Image (tube, helix red, strand yellow):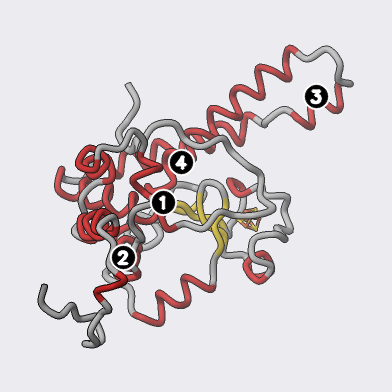
Amino acid sequence: MPPLLTAAGDEFDKARITLYAYRHSYAQRHADAGTPVDVLRELMGHKTLGTTQTYYRVSEKRTRQAVDRLVTLQFDRHGSRLWDEAKALLDHEHTRMRIGQVAVPFGICAEPSNVKAGGHACPFRFRCLGCDHFRTDPSYLPDLRTYLDTLLRDRERLAAATELDAWARAEATPSEEEISRLRRLIRRVESNLDALTDEEREEIRQATSALRRSRAVQLGMPTLRPAAGGLPLEREA
Ligand code: SF4
């Protein structure tokens, strides 16, 4: 075997090579080339996407490309596009985005005190759909749909609950305003995706896959059950 050189040009110690590591290299190269994770799962013979995802890391470059692609489809809480004309973000804008926002379960929060506290100090009890500091993009579409399911299920369950005082039931029941705002936001994201070409939608799908893989798990936030399936960006029947 010829000398193996690292990215810095040093020779890699061949004694440290294990055959099994080739599976990781194989997965990483496919991931960097943008192979969809479900295709990679097939190629690697895994039963679950979760197993496949442990075989590669999302590179900084790929994350940046994904952020660039999705930022043009960022929406405020009213469903209005925020960066209609946005092109690739400059370096300092990437840095600002990373430190100037934190993830919330179905989008992004840019409220300074909450960002400073790492997402643990929302001053508005996480009423994101009614907050000017909230924004979202198509990578959160599965989570928006899951949240809508949760609200609808909670509304039904609370309507049938007999063990609550009226005031407690009223406070715990999701408001019609929140439900209708969420439905409207989902429709806006979906209709913007519908307007894209097949090629653009595929780019968004790949960017979504990269970002959802790299997104940090948030602490101290209201939790949602994970969105079912892979990345269902398409409209539901
Ligand atoms: S309501 Fe949501 S978007 Fe607004 S400050 Fe709180 S966490 Fe941030």
Q: CA distance from mark 4 to mark 1?
A: 20 Å
Looking at the image, is mark 4 or mark 2 nearer the viewer? 2
User: Mark 1 or 3 closer to N-term?
Assistant: 3
Q: What residue sits right under mark 4 in the picture?
A: 185
How far apart marks 3 and 2 lie (CA) works out to 43 Å
- Which mark is in front, 4 or 1? 1
Q: Does mark 2 have its CB less than 8 Å from ligand 1?
A: no
Where 171 sits versus 213, above or below? above
Q: Where is ligand 1, by quadrant?
A: bottom right
- Please identify, in this view, whether the residue under mark 1 or under mark 3 is nearer the observer: 1
Callout 2 secondary element: helix
Residue 61, how many percent across, how many down? 30, 70
The residue to which callout 3 is attached is 169
Crowd rating for badge 4 (residues with CA inside 10 Å; few <14, some 14–19, many 20+): many
Residue depicted at x 61% and y 36%: 178
Res 146 label:
none
The kind of residue tagged 4 is Leu
* Residue 115 visible somewhere in the drawing: yes
Q: Is mark 4 within 8 Å of ligand 1?
A: no
